[in-house]
């Protein structure tokens, strides 16, 4: 019953702004969803359909979360200057000897702000009263749960939803999003996300790449992603090889291109890293095959090349690699960047954070559609006659891979107690993937990235599902 009820809520949560608002305001709902998620993580029971539904609901309720204060926030210019709170965060003492004087002074100022604006307490500072209800959605503490799922779960739907939740929470302009972006870094979440870029499930990779793009709004995140994730990002771009490119959607390619553009646009060293990782060849492959990719992907690829050329100090380096100006700056791209709606504008589609929500997919992906000649509940569906729900038993034979019945089952003997897994991906499969043209082997402590040769590699041996990555400062490891 819980699985079906959560499936209904999952579909409702994707129905639009009104549905999101009503669900956020529903007393106890968000609290319960987070409680279920944390209990499932503690008990290592995270691969089932009920857990998937709960995470998908939270992902959808995180979509456009700033609309609770300003429903038109995304129609405003994206802020380019750091807020007062984010500036104060730079003065934090992240060591073990307590806060600095500057931090204590900022805390006093925060208390005064909270007294003047009670709403600000629950949304950002989290005062003496316990946070509850919808405000739990965007508290930095939720980051830990999503990262534990991303590290341990094998259900692709749950992985996509957890990455999508982080993507949405990091996509807004307000203070909670600033704190979420910092929390992912401090909880050592960036290596976990980069590791998932190596998966072969496209929708997971797309959500992860978009999350990284939004997290890169934070300057320190941007530096870490540029330093340690460049090769993984480049590897997701099409190489011109049908075998390599198969299965990568245009949405995923666009998300990777947006991340790369965000990382290199003000950093010549990262642009050099993109060149050395073979990025120019792959970008050129996209721009030369306009009929193969959507206009959005071709536009993004051309803009990344244009951004690379803006680093004048690297132009001689480009030429030494055999590239010329016309490879980076086409007449179309040059004209586009000269206009008032230039892609370099901070409010262009390429430069704004991206948010997304899941569609109403619960029914489509869980009910097995009957075929002619099948038995079980075929008669109830095929003959057009109504049948009581209690009479709907399981279809004969084993259910297809990846399918779970949502109707009340008939007399069925299960080999194992508990709820069956909905779907799994082989997380270990990506261990054997090698970067093209690079070598090296894994080693080092569990959960520790290793720098080997020309690329950064994250040790993919799983930690325990309830093991919390050590919180700390701004380092990658």
Image: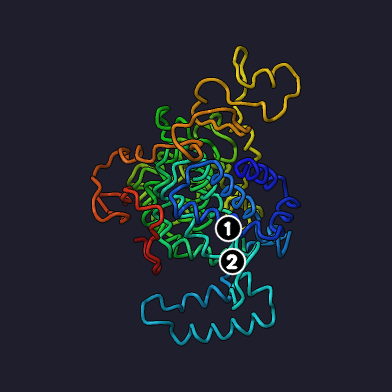
Q: Is residue 23 visible?
A: yes
Q: CA distance from mark 1 to mark 2?
A: 8 Å
Give percent across and percent down for residue 332. 58, 42
Residue appearing at x 27%, y 42% in the figure: 438
Q: Is residue 264 visible?
A: no
Q: Which residue is mark 2?
A: 176
Give percent across and percent down for residue 56. 59, 47
Residue appearing at x 60%, y 68% in the figure: 175
Give percent across and percent down for residue 374. 59, 15
Residue appearing at x 33%, y 44% in the figure: 321
Q: Which residue is mark 1?
A: 169
Viewer-closest of 374 and 142: 374
Give yes or no for contact between labels 1 and 2 (Cβ–Cβ under 8 Å). Answer: yes
Viewer-closest of 195 and 258: 195
**Which comes sooner in the sequence, label 1 or label 2?**
1
Residue appearing at x 66%, y 60% in the figure: 28
Total numbered badges shown on the rendered structure: 2
Color style of the picture: rainbow
State which quarter of the image contains the C terminus.
bottom left
* Mark 1 secondary-structure assignment: helix
Give the left or right position of residue 153, taking residue 392 as reference.
left
* Mark 2 secondary-structure assignment: helix
Residue 307: numbered disc: none
State which quarter of the image contains the N terminus.
top right
Viewer-closest of 88 and 390: 390
Viewer-closest of 465 and 165: 465
**On screen, 376 above or below 151?**
above
Give the left or right position of residue 391, taking residue 420 as reference.
right
Q: Residues within 10 Å of mark 1 (few under 14, many from 20)?
A: many
Give percent across and percent down for residue 274. 39, 49
């Amino acid at each position: 019953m819980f699985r079906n009820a959560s499936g209904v809520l999952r579909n409702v949560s994707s129905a639009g702004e009104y549905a999101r608002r009503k669900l956020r305001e529903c007393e106890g709902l968000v609290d319960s969803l987070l409680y279920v998620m944390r209990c499932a993580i503690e008990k290592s029971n995270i691969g089932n359909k009920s857990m998937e539904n709960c995470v998908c609901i939270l992902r959808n309720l995180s979509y456009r979360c700033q609309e609770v204060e300003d429903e038109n926030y995304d129609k405003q210019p994206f802020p380019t200057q750091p807020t007062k709170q984010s500036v104060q965060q730079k003065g934090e003492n992240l060591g073990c000897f307590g806060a600095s004087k500057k931090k204590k002074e900022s805390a006093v100022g925060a208390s005064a702000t909270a007294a003047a604006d009670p709403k600000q307490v629950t949304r950002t500072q989290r005062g003496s009263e316990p946070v509850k209800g919808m405000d739990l959605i965007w508290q930095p503490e939720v980051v830990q749960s999503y990262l534990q799922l991303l590290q341990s779960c094998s259900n692709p739907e749950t992985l996509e939803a957890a990455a999508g939740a982080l993507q949405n929470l990091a996509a807004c302009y307000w203070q909670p999003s600033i704190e979420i972006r910092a929390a992912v870094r401090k909880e050592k979440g960036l290596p976990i996300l980069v590791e998932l870029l190596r998966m072969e499930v496209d929708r997971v990779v797309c959500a992860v790449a978009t999350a990284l793009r939004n997290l890169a709004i934070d300057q320190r995140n941007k530096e870490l992603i540029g330093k340690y994730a460049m090769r993984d990002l480049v590897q997701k771009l099409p190489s011109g090889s049908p075998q390599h490119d198969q299965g990568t959607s245009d949405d995923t390619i666009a998300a990777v291109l947006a991340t790369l553009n965000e990382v290199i646009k003000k950093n010549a060293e990262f642009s050099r890293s993109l060149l050395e990782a073979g990025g120019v060849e792959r970008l050129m492959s996209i721009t030369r095959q306009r009929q193969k990719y959507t206009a959005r992907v071709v536009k993004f690829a051309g803009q990344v090349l244009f951004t690379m050329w803006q680093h004048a100090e690297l132009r001689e380096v480009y030429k030494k690699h055999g590239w010329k100006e016309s490879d980076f700056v086409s007449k179309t791209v040059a004209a586009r960047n000269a206009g008032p709606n230039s892609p370099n504008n901070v409010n262009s589609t390429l430069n704004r954070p991206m948010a997304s929500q899941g569609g109403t997919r619960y029914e489509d992906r869980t009910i097995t559609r009957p075929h002619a000649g099948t038995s079980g509940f075929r008669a109830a569906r095929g003959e057009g006659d109504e049948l009581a729900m209690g009479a709907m038993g399981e279809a004969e034979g084993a259910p297809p891979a990846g399918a779970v019945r949502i109707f009340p089952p008939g007399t069925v003997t299960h080999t194992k107690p508990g709820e069956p897994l909905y779907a799994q991906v082989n997380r270990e499969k990506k261990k054997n993937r090698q970067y093209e043209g690079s070598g090296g082997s894994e080693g080092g402590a569990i959960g520790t990235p290793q720098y080997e040769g020309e690329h950064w590699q994250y040790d993919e041996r799983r930690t325990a599902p309830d093991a919390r990555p050590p919180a700390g400062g701004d380092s990658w490891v």
